[in-house]
Amino acid sequence: MGSILQISGTLGAEELKPLGQINQYMRITGELYGSYETWNYFRPSPAINDSNAYDLWALRARFGALLTTSYVDAYAQAQYVGLYGLPDDAVASPAGPLGLGGAYFLANQSTNASNVFLKQAYLNLKFNSVGAPGAFLKIGRFEFMDGMEYGTGIDKFDGLKRTRVAQRLVASNVVHVGRSFDGFNAVYDQPAFNITATGMHPTQGGFTVQGQDEIGDINLFYAALTSKKDALLPGTEGRLFYLNYDDKRNTQVVDNRPINDRPQLNSQDLNIQTIGAHLLTLHQWDSGSIDALLWGAYQFGNWTNQDHQAWAIAAEAGYQWTQLPVKPWLRAIYFLSSGDDNAKDGMHNTFFSMLPSGRAYAKLPFYNLMNLQDAFLQMTVSPTPATKVTIDLHHLSLTNSGDLFYGGLGPTASSGAFGYSGRPSDGKGDVGQLVDISFTHTLTKKLSWRFYYGHAFGGSVIENVYQGKKDADMVYVDFNLIF
């Protein structure tokens, strides 16, 4: 909703008035999103409820009202979400949900689940008029993603930030339902730098359509200092960040210890400190552009009754031939996160990804960024200015084969499931390969649609977990209309 907050002052000519603009102070906003998915997932053998082939539909509508003045913005947004045709026989025992359809059914206990709830409701106080230009304080329920504290206004640079920097640890964009955050967001924004500090609780969401309730037993504090693009180095942005995650829910932690040795979080606190940084650079010439990214995080704290120390790194580089037909853009990406090789030493070394985005870093989400090595090539071409085709070729493996193979997108409910699953790899390390193709067509600035196909070639880890069919396919087609 960052662009919404830019609306201020007197509107221009009547014909340029944005859709939904009532007057210079009031604007109505909306979004309509729809998706059709078909799955042919890995299949365990033997198993109970092992339907791995199904399709489903999703519909999401958002309606909001924004009041803008010189001193404060006020925004309220309602959301309807519906999940239809969910499979009731795709939660296998002991393998768990066979794709997102099984996870949706497990969370909602219905083949058709829908709900209306308050997605956002906040006041954004502006201190420009009282002698503190660039200072803002947002209070209430809002969306948030780490790494997107400000935007440059340059499509390519901001696109890299949104898809390759942001949402690794905290994000509102979680598959169809999403999540919000209740709390405050303080910003001091200047031409050369941005300082952001946020304290908040996540709401439910993700898999469950019951997105109204706050998860009060999870406390988050996030702070970031960002050197804006070109401030210190030409074409380069840098960020230092800190994140504290504290979880006291009535649920059992998931790690590589025997199940009976894993404490409940309401009796043994899970408190993780994360410090990290990123550098993103983009340089454009007449013949093309070159980009590079370095991202890293180190974690310490208490993983219930164990000491926690873990880390993750990402290194990426790309080049786009902007003068060639279809403007090919080739990128090489390497991600590595730590795993735990000893369940009995009183230390927990598995990197914890907290509350990340769904599908941002695993478009076919049979894996996540915990105890993982992901090396892949990405090619993007643009046959027309409104069309983009992206092909990713991933090689996936466990960092430590003595640890578990983790899945999940983080906590989505106040109690019950931890939010992550973990399955033994039996000493295996090869997760497999993933090939996926995304086709996006922007019809107008407000309307776009997308086609995605992903195929996973399961390796020895997948074979050990499922003991049956070890390849998977997913196709989805969706559209998004905003005003």
Image (cartoon, rainbow, N blue to C red):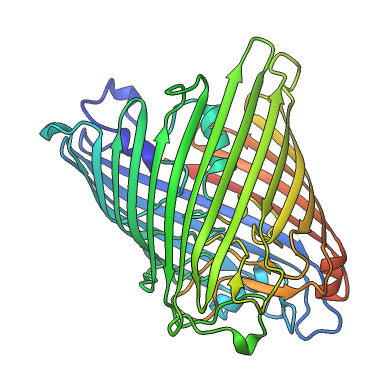
Q: Nearer the viewer, residue 84 or 191?
A: 191
Q: At x 63% / y 30%, what residue is drawn?
A: 292
The quadrant in which the C terminus is found is: top left
Q: 152 left or right of 341? A: left
Q: At x 51% / y 79%, what residue is drawn?
A: 305
Please state the horizontal and vertical placement of residue 165, each as a whole percent of the image: 55, 42
- The picture quadrant where one finds residue 287 is top right
Q: Residue furthest left?
A: 130
> Is 64 placed above or below 459 here?
above
- The picture quadrant where one finds residue 273 is bottom left
Please state the horizontal and vertical placement of residue 456, each as a whole percent of the image: 81, 57
> Is 9 placed above or below 298 here?
above
Q: At x 64% / y 76%, what residue is drawn?
A: 345
> Is 134 placed above or below 358 here?
above
Q: 141 left or right of 276? A: left
Q: Is residue 118 visible?
A: no
Q: At x 42% / y 60%, what residue is drawn?
A: 244
> Is 417 placed above or below 361 here?
below
Q: Residue furthest top?
A: 286
The quadrant in which the N terminus is found is: top left
- The picture quadrant where one finds residue 379 is top right
